[in-house]
Amino acid sequence: THFGYKQVDKQEKVNLVADVFHSVAAKYDMMNDLMSMGVHRLWKRFTIDCSGVRSGQRVLDLAGGTGDLTAKFSRLVGESGKVVLADINGSMLKVGRDKLRDMGIVGNVETVQANAECLPFPDNYFDIVTIAFGLRNVTDKDAALASIFRVLKPGGRLLVLEFSKPENEQFGKLYDWYSFNILPAMGKMVANDADSYQYLAESIRMHPDQETLKGMMHGAGFEQVTYHNLTGGIVALHRGFKF
Ligand code: SAM
C-alpha cells in the first residue's frame, strides 16, 4: 500500500493528508458518528469541560475541521468572545462553515485556512487552543506545538484530544483489529474510500503515546502538563499551560 508512510517523505505526507481530508470532508461527520459509535461526542464534551472556558475569551479550534468544538465554544464565549476555526484543508473548512451557518452560529466565529506549523496569529493572542484529532496529521508536530505556544497568552492553556495507547494489552489488540479491519471496511462500504480509513488506522498506530506526547509538550515550553485517558486510553486528553 502507498500508505506505508513510514517511508514517505514530508511533502508526501502533506499531500497524503490533504487528499484524505478532501476526500472524506462531505461524509466526515457521519463517519465519525458511525466509527466511534457516537462516543466522539463524549470525548469532545469532556474537552470543553476541561477547557475552563469563560465568557469573553478568545479560543482557537485548531485543525478544527467541521467545527464541532467551535460550535460548543461559540455558545460559551458569548458575544464578547471569539472563536477561530482554523484548518489547513479548504474542503473541511467549507463543510464546517456551512454547518455552523445552518446552526445559526455566525457572530463570534471566524474561519481561517492555516497550517498549525506556522500559525498566522499574533503572539500572546488566545486564552485557549484546542487541537482535536488533528496533531497526528501534522507533519512537524514540534513546530506545531511551538507555534501554538507562541499564540497563547501567558496563563493560557492547550488541550490536545487525540488517539493514544490503550492501557490494557488485550483491549489494545482488539482495538487494533477493529482499526485495521472494521474501519477500512466501513470506509469502503459507506464512503467508498477504504484508503482514507486505512490511513486513519495507520496514523493512529504511529501517533506518540501518552507519555511521549506529554514530553513533547514540555519540550515546547508547556508547564503542568497532565493527561486523562478516555475509553481505556483509545483517546487521551492532554492539557498544558503557558506561563
Ligand atoms: N477537530 C475536528 C474534529 O475533532 O472532528 C477535525 C479532526 S480531523 C480528523 C483532522 C483535521 O486536521 C483535518 O480537518 C485536517 O485538514 C486537519 N489538519 C491536518 N494537518 C493540519 C495542519 N498541518 N494544520 C492545520 N490543520 C491540519
Image (spheres, rainbow, N blue to C red):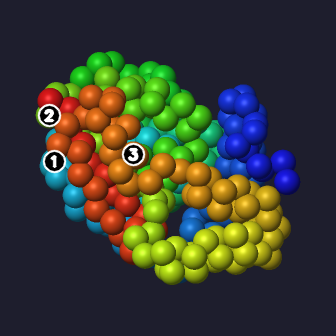
Badge number at residue 155: 2
Residue at (79% x, 65% y) in the render: 194
Which of the numbered marks, if any, corresponds to residue 213?
A: 3
Q: Which residue sits furthest right?
A: 1
Relative to 232, residue 66 above or below: above
Q: Amino acid at mark 1?
A: Ser
Can I make out residue 84 in this image?
yes
Give the alpha-carbon distance from disc 3 to disc 1, as whole Å: 30 Å
How dense is the environment of label 1, judged by Cα within 10 Å: few (below 14), some, or many (20 and up)?
A: some
Mark 3 or mark 1, which is nearer to you? 3
On residue 55, which mark appears? 1
Where residue 109 appears, as percent x and y from the top left, is 38, 42
SS label for mark 2: strand
Say left or right for 182 vs 117. Answer: right
Which comes before the other along the chain, label 3 or label 1? 1
Q: In percent of the image, x 45 and y 69: which residue is there?
A: 166
| In the foreground, 38 or 209 | 209
Residue type highlighted by circle 2: Gly
